[in-house]
Image (spheres, rainbow, N blue to C red):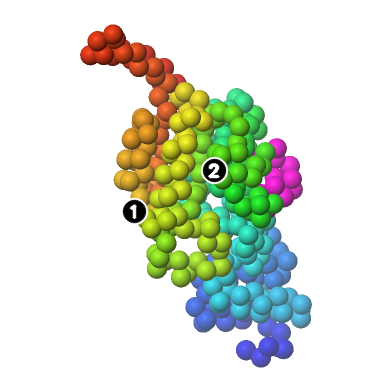
Amino acid sequence: MDPHARNSVAECLRQAHALGLARVDAQILMLHAMSRPLHDRAWLLAHDTDLMITAQQHSWDQALQRRLQGEPVAYITGRKEFFGLTLNVDARVLDPRPDTEILVEWALELLPSGQPSRVLDLGTGSGAVALALQHQRPAAQVTAVDASADALAVASANAQRLNLPVQCVLSHWMDAVPGQFELIVSNPPYVAEGDPHLADLTHEPLQALTSGADGLDDIRQIIAQAPSRLAPGGWVLLEHGWDQAAPVQALLREAGFVQVQSRRDLGDIERCTGGMLPACRVHETLTGSNPSIQCMHDPV
Ligand code: GLN
């Protein structure tokens, strides 16, 4: 297409299709170029013969080029919808995935409304999970942690803009976080170093993606720290890779968690695994042969 030409909305969308762009990506980039709300796809249908003005055409051309070079749509628009919130995102943080909403839904099942449950989101990135939980459970005390000051700046700017009282803490996992929690959630880095899939993710921060040779280094650290930081009966919920449900379940059981289970994502892949720290005290008898166990299995 002539770079100086002004085209209709429909012509531009056809151009994107011919270049191999996913339809939904092209639609969102077009709404961005036209300064429309990104969910307003009905507008595109009603305005497909509209001729773009020069600035809009320029914005579209630039967006198209960036997307063709593999940049996530969210970085180009600077925004991403997540669990009903519009987050500002850029290359300092992972592009929040719709699959991560599964983690939020599971967390909400464990968090009764109206109670001041203490919730910790480890590796918060844009703040997506922490902010969604705080938005849904206003009475909860949500702490969002990241080891990247850059990421934490994005999360706390989102918290401020959305007026959600999430506390943002710079910390490597729980190292610098005080207190105990009823719920720990995390979408940590979990891609194995050298995974060929990383070739498609070059625009996102590598430190938010990879975690050692098998992708489980960070999950191992979180599971090792969690029992000492959870209140009795508290839960830890972790997002992980498509083939990691079994090892994550094993790690949780080894660390003493019970009710260990996994949840499937939108593509029917086991994507999140969690467990509860038992509210049990094991009292060994003097002989040690007949331990009596007292449990109160009240989830969060
Ligand atoms: N789910 C992302 C991907 O594989 C990775 C996110 C992560 O490492 N936490 O595209």
Q: Residues within 10 Å of mark 1 (few under 14, many from 20)?
A: few
Res 230 seen here: yes
Q: Nearer the viewer, residue 128 or 202?
A: 202
Provide the residue designation for mark 1: 243
- State which quadrant residue 257 falls in: top left
Q: Earlier in the sequence, mark 2 or mark 1?
A: 2
Find the distance from the CA under tag 2 to the CA under tag 1: 23 Å
The residue furthest top is 286
Q: Secondary structure at mark 1?
A: loop
Viewed as shown, does residue 130 lie left or right of 3? left
Whether 225 is drawn above or below 70: the answer is: above
Name the amino acid type tagged 2.
Answer: Trp
Viewed as shown, does residue 215 lie left or right of 35? left
Provide the residue designation for mark 2: 173
Task: Residue at 60% x, 39% y: name it.
Answer: 176
Specify the principal SS of the magenta part.
Answer: helix
Please name which of the two marks, 2 or 1, marks the residue nearer to the observer. Answer: 2
Task: Residue at 23% x, 14% y: name it.
Answer: 289
Q: Secondary structure at mark 2?
A: loop
Write the start and end of the magenta stretch as one range. 154-166
